[in-house]
Image (cartoon, grey):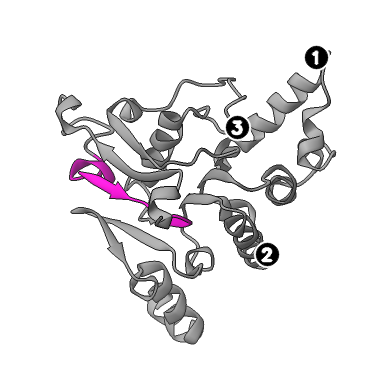
Amino acid sequence: MSALSEQYIREIKLRRERVASFDRYPFSLAAVRNMQSLPLHPAVTFIVGENGSGKSTLLEAIAVAWGFNPEGGSKNFNFQTRASHSVLHQSLTLVKGIRRPKDGYFLRAESFFNVATDIERMDAEPGGPPIINSYGGRSLHEQSHGESFFALLLNRLFGHGLYILDEPEAALSPTRQLAMLTRMHQLVESRSQFIIATHSPILMAYPNAWLYQISTSGLSRIEYRETEHYIVAKRFLNDPAGQLEKLLG
């Protein structure tokens, strides 16, 4: 039996017949406008692109179509601080594999504060063990953004899971991004699947991952060393003085 048949989500399909107009948001976005289907890697799939290209909107729609809260968390979270998610999920079909995950999480770097607040709200209610125990036992609000996210990564994600992460590097130093690669690999070896939107050339170097880059013509598979993120970072780090001279005159 192939790994592709065993993964949790095999493919994302856009039901184009359900779209009234591709001139309206979010269907006008480069990531969506020309989309037919998006096959996913059994372990790690990255979606990369410029700000405003639609990668976070697409990731959010995949997460909501799976049943996650639009602002993040597991399927048990149902809070809403602001109704800002798009209707894109209504036009997506998730082609699932034969396995079902035992765990799952949707991380949005921009709204993880709201998740931490909802954990404290639920833990203040009577009944059951504290939810914060699954995050290391220390209030996420008493930690830095990076510390709280890493507590999630190390303690809350336990494998055999579907994990959708939107720009996780926003909270992490380069050293912590390297540590995240190690933790990701542990979870992949525990039969987990990741879908990640990122700008980080460190994270997207994960071996054998599939990378989709969003251009004006839509989503297309690309090799790591062909990504703009890798090219720009390598060019700058190889000659920072020369690059700064070009930029600053």
Instruction: Give the number of the mark in front: 2 or 3.
Output: 3
Identify the mark nearer the N-term, 1 or 2. Answer: 1
Q: Residues within 10 Å of mark 2 (few under 14, many from 20)?
A: some
* Residue 167 in view, yes or no: no
Q: Secondary structure at mark 2?
A: helix
Tell me the magenta residue range: 29-46
Query: Based on the displayed image, in which of its 4 quarters is residue 186 positioned?
Result: bottom right
Identify the mark nearer the N-term, 2 or 3. Answer: 3
The foreground one among 185 and 177 is 185
Q: What's the CA distance linking mark 2 and mark 3? A: 23 Å
Q: In the drawing, does residue 2 fall left or right of residue 143?
A: left
Q: Residue 11 location, x and y as percent?
A: 33, 45
Q: What residue lies at 40% left-to-right and 30% top-to-bottom?
A: 65
Query: Based on the displayed image, in which of its 4 quarters is residue 84 positioned?
Result: top left
Q: Secondary structure at mark 1?
A: loop
Q: Which residue is mark 3?
A: 74
Q: Residue 134 location, x and y as percent?
A: 77, 37
Query: Based on the displayed image, in which of its 4 quarters is residue 215 positioned?
Result: bottom left
Q: Residue 212 location, x and y as percent?
A: 33, 58
Q: How many marks?
A: 3
* Residue 86 in view, yes or no: yes
Kind of residue at badge 3: Ser
Q: Which residue is mark 1?
A: 125
Q: Which residue is mark 2?
A: 179
